Amino acid sequence: GGVGKTTLARKVYDDIYMEHHFYVRAWITVSQMHQHREMLLGILRCFSLVNDYTYLKSTEQLAEQVYRSLKGRRYLIAMDDVWDTTAWDVVKRSFLDDKNGSRVILTSRLANVGIYASSGSPPHYMRCLSVDRSLKLFNLRVFGRENCPLELEKATKQIVGKCQGLPLAL
């Protein structure tokens, strides 16, 4: 972790164009200990479609409600931190393809999950930052500019080296 998958997905999801382009949007964090019902309820919460009766529904009924709430609408669903393919299997049947430009963003540290959930377009693989980019990011965060003071250059390079190009560590 720490390479910036969630940050990139969040930037795309929160973009003003995305807010206007998609009729409905939902962001759910799945993580390792996901529960199928909670994923579906999380999506419905984003649509403000949850009431006391909703919690009494079975997983299948919740999946059907998600399906009905998306039908005919252009949607953007973000599933963050997916650790296995079963999480995708639970929700994918609710994501119909109306050929209207709807999209699902899925982040995972496991390549097989991205490949499994892919709908024909290849997954985007995040890479660590180069040493130069790491230095620039570190300097911007610490000093407010791309270069550090000369007397701190050696220490800065040592710190950046230990971060191994991971933006979250910087």
Image (tube, rainbow, N blue to C red):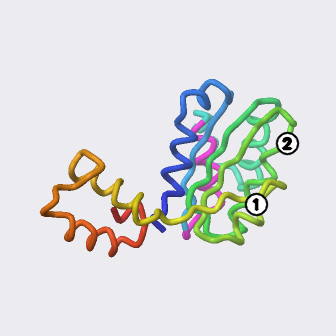
Q: Is residue 46 left or right of residue 1?
A: right
Residue at 76% in and 58% down: 122
Q: Say which amino acid is labelled 2.
A: Asp
Q: Work out which quarter of the rendered image holds the C terminus and state it.
A: bottom left
- Which structural element holds mark 1? helix
- Residue 44 is a magenta residue: yes
Q: Quadrant of residue 36?
A: bottom right
Residue at 52% in and 45% down: 10
Which residue matches tag 2?
97
Camera-nearest residue between 104 and 56? 104
- Residue 24 is a magenta residue: no
**Depicted 161 relative to depicted 105: above or below:** below
Q: Which x, y percent locates residue 84?
A: 66, 70
Which residue matches tag 1?
117
**Depicted 157 relative to depicted 72: above or below:** below
- Which structural element holds mark 2? loop
Q: Quadrant of residue 162?
A: bottom left
> CA gap, disc 2 to disc 1?
14 Å
**Depicted 12 relative to depicted 121: above or below:** above
Q: Main secondary structure of the magenta part?
A: helix
Q: Which residues are magenta?
A: 32-46
Q: Which x, y percent locates residue 8?
A: 53, 49
